[in-house]
Amino acid sequence: MSNGFKPKTTKKIKINKRSAITLDGKHREYLNEFIKDDVDRIPELKLERDNLQKKTADTNITLSLEERLDIKDRLKEINKTIKNCHLKKKEYLLENKVDIHYDDCILTIKSLESTNIKGILVKNKIK
């Protein structure tokens, strides 16, 4: 007696979490990269920059012209790298700001309306 239904399969679908890329996962990756830059990379570069600046400013140390030019080039490299780290973070956050900002505004307005501050919102031209 066949009732027309297929038997239930016992297979389990395996998902490789490393290959399954989600929007939240990618966003988290970017934020972790920015934190790593802020905590590890930028302080190291700033320390190196300070040491090189002290080395060039110290009158007790005599440096050849080539060494001074190498230090000057390295200082430019360090400043460019630090600037690029900040710029990369800023651009990413600004590109994705619209969605985040919109959600935050909606939540803020809803929470303000729930506390009956609507008169103040209209008075300040925030709707």
Image (cartoon, rainbow, N blue to C red):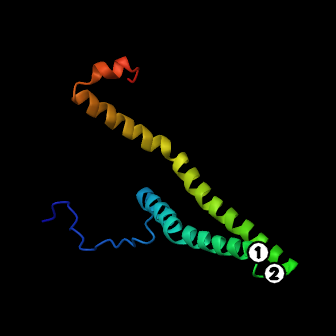
Give me the residue at 50% from left, 61% from top.
30
Residue in view at x 44 percent, y 56 percent: 23
Where's residue 44, x and y in %?
57, 73
Q: CA distance from mark 1 to mark 2?
A: 10 Å
> In the orientation shown, which residue stands out farthest toward the left?
1
Query: Marks 1 and 2: CB-CB under 8 Å?
Result: yes
Q: Secondary structure at mark 2?
A: loop
Q: Residue furthest front?
A: 60
Question: Residue 42 at what x, y percent from top left?
Answer: 57, 67
Name which residue type carries label 1: Ile
Mark closest to the chain's N terminus, 1 or 2: 2
Q: Position of residue 87 (x, y in %)?
A: 61, 55
Q: Which residue in the protein does label 2 denote?
A: 63
- Classify 110 as above or below 69: above
Mark sitting on residue 51: none
Which residue occupies 44% across, 40% down?
101
Callout 1: helix, strand or loop? helix
Out of 118 and 42, give the one closest to the viewer: 42
Kind of residue at disc 2: Leu
Residue that numbered label 1 is attached to:
71
Residue 74 vs residue 19, the one in the foreground:
74
How packed mark 2 is, by other alpha carbons closer than 10 Å (few <14, some 14-19, many 20 or more), is: some
Q: Is residue 120 left or right of residue 45?
A: left
Quadrant location of residue 15? bottom left
- Find the residue positioned furthest to the right: 65
Q: Quadrant of the N terminus?
A: bottom left
